Image: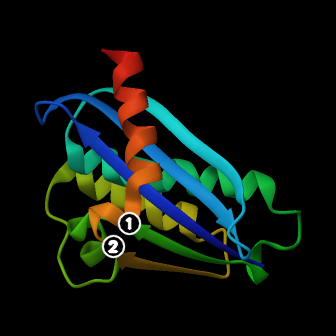
Amino acid sequence: MHFTIHADGGARGNPGPAGAGAMIRDELGNSVASVSKFLGHRTNNFAEYEAVILSLEALAKLVPAGKHSATEVAVKMDSELVVKQMKGEYKVKHPVLKEQYARLIHAAGAFGRVSFSHVRREENTDADALANEAMDRGD
């Protein structure tokens, strides 16, 4: 099984009212789930991590028992920081982001393979809209 997640997070004011959004698609490009959650007063980097964590947790509930280890997930996001930290190109220094990083590693561990790639903002519009909807609901 193969899934693609487009994830995005943001904060108005940074820190400020924050939201996480993600769209999960199957190998045919069909939407199978989405995430849109208000996160309270947070930074944009916290929200970016949270969007991926929440989407992986949602996907874990959708994948049938016994199929997790055979599932590949491609995470696409416009946060260069998160992508480079997950690839080991940047160190995670901030204590709160270290916690988010550990949570993300744990969530990703539920699957056979999880890859991260950076995409331009224009290629991440669904996730951006979901994150903004979450911020709008929480303001």
Residue 111 in the figure: left or right of residue 15: right
Task: Judge by depth and name the residue closer to the eye, 124 or 36.
Answer: 124
Name the amino acid type tagged 1: Glu
Q: Residue at x 22, y 36 (%)?
A: 11
- Residue 40: image x %, image y %? 32, 23
Q: Is residue 70 left or right of residue 13?
A: right
**How many labels, in total?**
2
Per the image, label 2 sits on a secondary structure element best described as loop
Question: x and y percent of residue 24 in the render?
Answer: 62, 58
Mark 1 neighbour class, 10 Å CA radius: few under 14, some 14 to 19, many 20 or more: some
Residue 123 numbered mark, or none: 1
Q: Give the labeled residue for mark 2.
A: 119
Q: Quadrant of the N terminus?
A: bottom right
Instruction: Identify the residue shown where x is 36% and y is 54%.
Output: 49
Determine whether label 2 and label 1 are within 8 Å by CB: yes
Instruction: Classify mark 1: helix, strand or loop.
Output: helix
Rendered residue at 37%/47% (across/down): 128
Quarter of the rendering containing residue 134: top left
